[in-house]
Image (cartoon, rainbow, N blue to C red):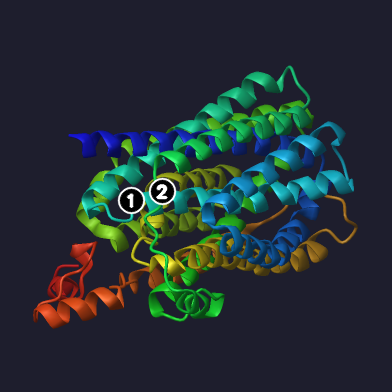
Amino acid sequence: MIENREARLQTLLLALTLGLATAAFIIAKTGRDALFFQGSGGLLQLPLVYINIGAASLPLALIFVKAMKTWGARPARVGVLLLAAAVMAAAAPFLEPGDNIPLLAIFMFIPAIFGLLFASLWLLATDIFEKTEKREAARAFSKIGAGTLAGGMLGGLVAKGLASHLDAKWLIFLGATVILGVTALILYIHRRFPTNVVTKKDHDKEKRTGFLTALSNKYSLTLLFISMTGALAGLLIDFQFYAAAVSANMGSKGNASFFANFYILLNFMSLLLQLFATPKIQDRAGLRGGLMVLPLALIGGATFATAAATALSRSVLRVTEGGLRSSVHRSIWEQAFIPVDSAERSVVKIAVDGIGARIAEAIGAVAILFWLKQAVPEGMISTTLDTGWMAWATLVTVAVWLLITQKLRVQVKKETVDIKRAAAPDIECERFPDQCPCTTELGKGIA
């Protein structure tokens, strides 16, 4: 009973923490988007923004990993939260719409820093549920994901309610204050629940925590390629959505209301999926099957957008991508890092989600940039851009994403395998038993 009460408290606190962090992100992102996309200049700069974010992702990730090695993952987590709050709060009063360096810098800073922030918060959940039985961990992650989506919906409602009363830049300031509240919660969680990450000998830790070493096994590489193809597909879908929003010419407050409405709808749909679909999907399909849901749905959506190249079809594709990515895909995706050795998990997580995804987005942004130079040679958008080729590129990218995901096999930790081989001829997985080597082979006929 005490253990159940403790597990419920862990789930509740993590759901609240990630929910508030997501609310802060949505509030700040609404203000950022409203300022940046006032006029067509922001859309034309978007490919360069993605390229710069990709270029900055490696040093940011290296600094964060170095901080984790030097001070530990928990102090580094608090540090990245305080950095995000400080920079946004300091920059917000001076932001103005239009083509200016401060706005461009904050537009890039928010997704870059929140990428590290969310990776670190989900790593905390992985740490706390390290030794939890697979089914219980899956349920906990599903509830945490639901809390995250509820926070996103709350952030959208707050942004919508304030959009007509405040300049968009003050939404960014509000997001910074919410992050300070998240920091207080994190400090409490750190004190309340000790880490489950096993500390290894110094020489062994130095040997195993480099980026290349951590990514040298097939399982980690597969996660990296899934992240990269998924990020590239998301970039192509995002750009088409932003292009449709810019063509409406709604102004700063109109943009804020539009993006707030979109994020409310997106998070509400995601929350329904998370509450009613995700647990059933994972119970029946397992980890790999659950990760195939999003690319399968996007193949249908991208096919529809290719056949009917309309603003409605691309909006539906964006809602489908965002809704499934934030619900079914996210909570199952985070569990995919549990089988990674705890000594390497932080490095793998940052490399996969913090570096690989940003590099893939930068590659896609280069292609969009060259296309824009041909489509808008004078640097002014006078008509609605024809982004039909992106629907085809999205379809191809999602097909590759699906093929890579289909090859995913959950790794069995070598130490566990060696011990159990010595003890008995039959090997059992430490977790995710539905995807152990033996059951995977037996299940090939019905997969």
Please give the name of the residue rendered at 50% of the width and 64% of the height, measured from the top-left corner: 227
Count of picture labels: 2
Among the 4 quarters of the image, the one containing residue 234: bottom right
Name the spot of residue 65 as percent of width and height, x first. 59, 64
Quarter of the image where one finds residue 70: bottom right
Q: Are marks 1 and 2 in contact (CB under 8 Å)?
A: yes
In the displayed structure, would residue 111 be above or below residue 203?
above
Q: Is residue 234 above or below residue 315?
A: below
Question: Can you say which quadrant of the picture contains the N terminus?
Answer: top left
Q: Position of residue 105 (x, y in %)?
A: 80, 50
Count residues near mark 1 (Cα–Cα under 10 Å), then give few for <14, some for 14-19, many for 20+.
Answer: many
**For the point 85% across and 45% down, which residue is it?**
102
Which is more toward the observer, 222 or 394?
222
Residue under label 2, please give it: 125
Three-letter amino acid code at the position of disc 1: Phe
Density class for disc 2 (Cα within 10 Å; few <14, some 14-19, many ≥20) is: many
Question: In the picture shown, does residue 37 fall above or below 219?
Answer: above
Q: Is residue 314 left or right of residue 91?
A: left
| Residue topped by disc 1 | 129
The residue drawn where x is 33% and y is 65% is: 339
Q: State how far apart marks 1 and 2 are (Cα).
A: 6 Å
Question: What is the x, y in percent for residue 240?
Answer: 64, 51
What's the residue type where badge 2 is placed?
A: Ala
In the picture provided, is 443 more to the left or to the right than 322?
left
Horizontal relation, residue 394 to residue 382: left or right: left
Looking at this view, is 141 or 78 the one in front?
78
The quadrant of the rendering that contains the C terminus is bottom left
For mark 2, give the secondary structure.
helix
Provide the secondary structure element on which disc 1 rests.
Answer: loop
Q: Furthest residue to the top? A: 165
The answer, for residue 29, to whether it is visible in the render is yes
Image coordinates for residue 427, horizontal then vertical, percent: 15, 75
